[in-house]
Image: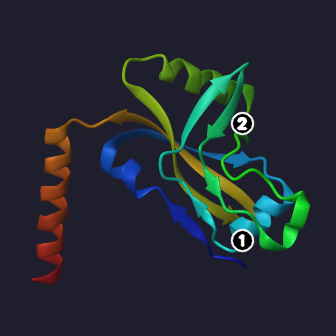
Amino acid sequence: MIKMEVRNKKAYYDYTILKEIEVGISLVGSEIKSVRNGSIDLKDSYVIIRDNEAYALNIYIAKYEEANNFNHDERRSRKLLLHKKEIKKIKEMKEMDGISIIPLKAYFKNNHFKLLIGVCKGKKLYDKRDSIKKRDLEREQRYS
């Protein structure tokens, strides 16, 4: 079994996560092979809701070299697999001021590729300083 997990570290630093939701993602064959090789990056990616369907934009999945001319576009929009009720809840939350939907993690679960998305609110500069200070204090306590 493959134990691969990719985290969006920048999202955890720039945003306060209000809610996490595990979703499936629709991929083509060359994309899943590339993901199994670990060639995925979630930095600067986000989720939009268009026509009552959720799409992940700007997720980078490198081209699979053995796919030849059947390869995929590296930054194409990919459909997220959610129930209509979940999409409706996310859409209502997104309409609040300052709320973004960001992919946080990508991983395999029971041989299916999953994406953990977060309903997030952007941090202010002083919030980022507080989180850095807490992280440093925890690190000092751990090594003391």
Give the answer, above or below, for where 16 lies relative to 108.
Answer: above
User: Residue at 74% of width from left, 32% of height from top?
Assistant: 83
Q: Which is nearer the N-term, disc 1 or disc 2?
A: 1
Along the line of sight, which residue is nearer the eye, 62 or 78?
62
Q: Amino acid at mark 1?
A: Arg
User: Residue at 90% of width from left, 60% of height from top?
Assistant: 69
Q: Give the residue number, with chain letter if any, for mark 1.
A: 36
Q: Residue furthest bottom?
A: 144
Which quadrant of the view contains residue 50? top right
Label 2 element class: loop
Residue 33 placement, left or right of 18: right
User: Residue at 72% of width from left, 21% of height from top?
Assistant: 52
- Total numbered circles: 2
Which quadrant of the view contains residue 31? bottom right
Q: Amino acid at mark 2?
A: Leu
Q: Rounded to the nearest whole Å, what is the CA distance between mark 1 and mark 2?
A: 23 Å
Give the answer, above or below, for where 24 lies relative to 32.
Answer: above
Q: Give the residue number, with chain letter if any, for mark 2.
A: 82
Residue 11 placement, left or right of 50: left
Query: Counting other residues with Cα less than 10 Å from the Cα at mark 2, is it few (<14), some (14-19), or many (20 or more)?
Result: some
> Residue 35, how many percent across, how many down?
70, 66
Q: Quadrant of the C terminus?
A: bottom left
Along the line of sight, which residue is nearer the eye, 64 or 135?
64
Is label 1 or label 2 in front? 1
Residue 106 can be seen in this image: yes
User: Residue at 77% of width from left, 68% of height from top?
Assistant: 64
> Residue 100, how many percent across, how many down?
45, 31
